[in-house]
Amino acid sequence: MSDRPIRMLIADDHPIVRDGLSSMFASAPGFEVLGQAADGAEAVRMAQALTPDVILMDLRMPVMDGLTAISELARLGVAARVLVLTTYDNDSHVLPAIEAGATGYLLKDAPREELLRGARAAAKGETVLSPAVATRLFNRVRTPPPQLLSQREIEVLELVAAGNTNREVASRLFITEATVKSHLLNIYAKLGVSDRAAAVAEAFNRRLLIPRG
């Protein structure tokens, strides 16, 4: 069973790319190319009919794009591992593809050996990421998201939550009442609320404020 070749399906809207990838995998030991799909919808149909081990999936395709196809394959319970192969490495492509169920994400400028290695790893269910994509995801995790409310806005909201009036908040923070009102309007806009009580409730809900005790 371990000697069985890895069964591949190639999905890309460019015939030259499909032919090149098919030839590369067909000539490499341990691989069998079952077919080629020109769009996401065709890839889904062929995956159901041919049961490949790995689908090499482009993202930008007509009729049905790669991201939609990945989601549809997951919905249908198709067991094939999807290895995205595209020219796009930005967050708006990488994260949605992984969240939709892709096993890996490689770029089309990857060397031949990296593609072969990636397909073998994907067939085993291992996560496969090109170095550029891995770096991007690492930096995204390492870099904290921007703070929703400023430190001053949190101070204002904490005093409001404690029952202080605008005048009392102004006195405690040594600012004017007009400034307090301005901060509150900014807070309402950021939290999507329209009054003090809703702002406090939403801030607690989002853990921007921590209940005392």
Image (spheres, rainbow, N blue to C red):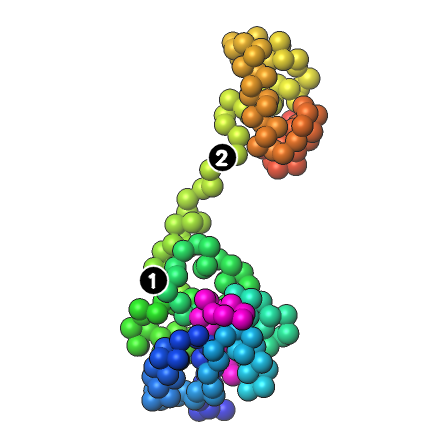
- Element marked by disc 1: helix
* Depth check, front residue: 151 or 3: 151
Residue drawn at point x = 41 percent, y = 87 percent: 31
Instruction: Identify the main secondary structure in magenta.
Output: loop
Earlier sequence position, callout 1 versus callout 2: 1
Does the magenta run of residues contain 65?
yes
**Of the pair 161 and 212, the residue shown nearer to us:** 161
Above or below residue 151? Residue 84 is below
Q: Is residue 167 above or below residue 72?
A: above
Determine if the magenta segment contains residue 46: no
Place residue 122 in its image quadrant: bottom left
Alpha carbon separation for disc pair 1 and 2: 29 Å
Camera sees residue 83: no
Residue at the outermost left position: 111
SS assignment at label 2: loop
The residue at the far right in this view is 197
Residue 115 position in % (x across, y down): 35, 75
> Which range of residues does the magenta coloring cover?
52-66
- Residue shown at the point (50%, 63%) measured from the top left: 97
Name the residue beneath numbered marker 2.
Answer: 147
Q: Name the residue that disc number 1 marks.
A: 131
Asked if residue 53 lies left or right of residue 120, the reply is right
**Mark 1 neighbour class, 10 Å CA radius: few under 14, some 14 to 19, many 20 or more:** few
